Image (tube, grey):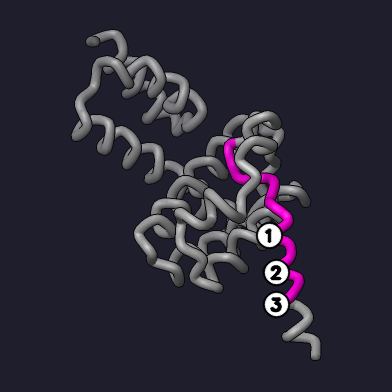
Amino acid sequence: MEILKKEVLKAQENGDIAELYTLEQRGQEMLNEEDLAGYYANILDLALERLTQTLEQKVRLNIEDIQDFSTLRALYEYAMEFYSAKKYNDASALFEILGGLSNDVVFAGAMRIHQDLVDLHVNMDDFISKMADIEATQEADSFYVKFFTDEAKELLGNLEQKVTI
């Protein structure tokens, strides 16, 4: 446990979000819920710092870079927490930011769909069971919902038709 703590502190000092995610897997078995919550809070704090730096520098994150990937993952998980808590405005805003933050067009497109579904107040249970293609997302080994069902596409397609009429 002491070795893990030292490694975590070193990763935090270095702002290494990717290493913190790696160490988190080892810590799952050793840490209680309160300690895990604090651990995730540290990851989120680092991700928010990187978000601020990225916005100040007016650059986009490269999903192929491990630190950028880990930052996007942490912020995506944060947005999903808002979504799950039915804080739709906060989730929508963060999905919008995420879509513009990454240079990956597939990720950006998926965030736009997330945002649209949140804006329609589709609850999390329906999002997971009816809108997200979880099987395809898992097969792609994606940290974010990358694929959507025909029902989601139809719902959003109908919305676009109403807006353009």
Q: In this view, does 30 lie above or below 117?
A: above
Quick check: marks 2 and 3 in contact, CB under 8 Å?
Answer: yes
Which quadrant of the view contains residue 165? bottom right
Q: Which residue is at a point 68% across and 39% down the rendered structure image?
A: 63
List x then y, in percent, for residue 126.
Answer: 51, 57
Q: Which residue is at a point 58% across and 65% down the rendered structure image?
A: 117
C-alpha separation, residue under disc 1 versus residue under disc 2:
9 Å
Which residues are drawn in magenta? 143-159
Q: Which residue in the structure is indicated by mark 2?
A: 156
Mark 1 is on which residue type?
Glu
Which quadrant of the view contains residue 95? bottom right
Q: Which residue is at a point 61% across and 55% down the rendered structure image?
A: 131
Q: Which residue in the structure is indicated by mark 1?
A: 151
Which image quarter is the N terminus in?
top left
Quick check: marks 1 and 2 in contact, CB under 8 Å?
Answer: no
Mark 2 is on which residue type?
Leu
C-alpha separation, residue under disc 2 versus residue under disc 3:
5 Å
Q: Residue 159 carries which label?
A: 3
Residue 101 on the magenta span: no
List x then y, in percent, for residue 3.
Answer: 29, 8
Circle 2 crowding by C-alpha within 10 Å: few under 14, some 14–19, many from 20: some
Q: Nearer the viewer, residue 90 or 83?
A: 83
Is 118 on the left-hand or right-hand side of 39? right
Which mark's residue is nearer the viewer, 1 or 2? Answer: 1
Residue 155 on the magenta span: yes
Indicate the secondary structure of the residue bearing disc 2: helix
Q: In this view, does 157 lie above or below 13?
A: below
Mark 3 is on which residue type?
Leu
